[in-house]
Amino acid sequence: MQNMDWGKLPFGYFKTDYNVRCYYRDGKWGEVEVSSSEYINIHMAATSLHYGQEAFEGMKAYRGKDGKIRLFRWQENAKRMRKSADGILMARVPDELFFEMVSKAVKLNERFVPPFGHGAALYIRPLLIGTGVQVGVSPAKEYMFMVFVGPVGPYFKEGFNPVSMQIISDFDRAAPLGTGHIKVGGNYAGSLFAMERAKAEGYASVIFLEAKEKKYIDEAGPANFFAIKDNTYITPKSNSILPSITNMSLMTLAEDLGLKVDRRQVAVEELDAFEEAGACGTAAIISPIGKITIRETGKVYEFAKDGKAGPVSTKLFKKLQGIQYGEEPDTHGWVTILD
C-alpha cells in the first residue's frame, strides 16, 4: 500500500479487496465463500430488515515490530457474538467458523494491515444477520455471517488525548431488562440522536445514565466508562451495559499494576472525587476524558486539568497497546499470531 498516510487514517469504512461469507440454511452452516463485492443480496422480507435480527462485533488485527499480524482475544468476540445471537434468537456461529472467517478476511487483505509504528490497525467487522423471510414477528430460519475489514486510525480524532463528554438524561440507550448487554444494532440506532446532538454541541460523545433511576452512569456512548480514584480502577456494573473486552482486559492489567478493581454502580455525584476518567472499547482502546458536562444543569466536572491523560490511564493504555502490538509479554495468552 504505497502512498498511504497510515498515521492520518480516520476511523471509518475503507474499501479493501475481499470479504468472506457463510450461510446458515436447513439447520447448518455451509461453505465459506470469498467475495470481492461490497454488496449483499437480501430478500425484502428478511428479518434483519424488519425485526432487528442483526448482531456484530468489532475487533482489530495489529502488525507488530516483527512484521507479524496479531489478533487480540478473538475467542471473547466469538463468545460475545454467540451471546448476542442467543439474545435475539439467531443461529450461533461456532468458534471454529468464526476464527476461520476472521483469519481468512485478514490474510486476504493483508496489504491493508497498517505497518507498525503509526498507531493504526486493521479493523475487523464480523456481522450476523437474519436473511430468512418472515412477515409475522418470529425468528428467521436462515442467516448470513460475514466478515469485512479495513484499516483505521483512532476512533476519536483527538487520539490518546482528553476529550469532552456530555451526560444526558432525556434519552436512554437501553432498558435494564432489554438488549443493552448484547451487541445488536438496535442499541446503536437508539443512541444516534443523542450522540449526534452531543457532537453538534461540541462534545466527542455522550454518557448515558441507567434508565431506571437516572442516578448512575451506564455507557460512554459506544464505549464503557471507567475512573481512577485512590489507586482503584472503577467501572460501572449494570445489566444494560455491553461487556467490553477492552474493559475486561484493562481490569486484569490494572490488577497486574497493583490497582484494586471496583466494578459496581457508579453514581454521577461521585465524579467530583475521581482523579481520572475515560472511555474504553475496541475502537477507542482508551479515550481519556478531560471534561464532563451535565446537559440539563450545565455542571462541569474536570479531569486532566493540564490537558494530558492521567498517569494511570497512560500506563494502562501503553501496557495494553504493547501487548496488542507484541512489544509487551503476552502473559495472559490473549494474542493469536496469524501464520
Image (cartoon, rainbow, N blue to C red):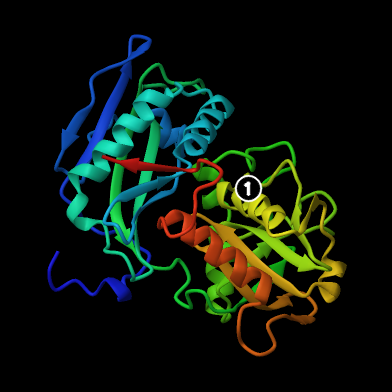
- In the rendered image, residue 119, in percent from the top left (x then y), is placed at 38, 69
Q: Amino acid at mark 1?
A: Met
Residue at 41 percent of width and 55 percent of height: 326
Q: Quadrant of residue 99?
A: top left
* In the image, farthest residue toward the bottom: 306
276 displayed left or right of 191: right
- Can you say whether 25 is above or below 100 in the image? above
Instruction: Write down the residue under mark 1.
Output: 248
Secondary structure, mark 1, is helix
Q: Nearer the viewer, residue 211 or 5?
A: 5
Q: Quadrant of residue 111?
A: bottom left
Residue at 23 percent of width and 20 percent of height: 31
The local crowd at label 1, few if under 14, some if 14 to 19, many if 20 or more residues have their Cα within 10 Å, is few
- In the rendered image, residue 147, in percent from the top left (x then y), is placed at 31, 39
Which quadrant does the N terminus fall into? bottom left
Q: Nearer the viewer, residue 123 or 301?
A: 123
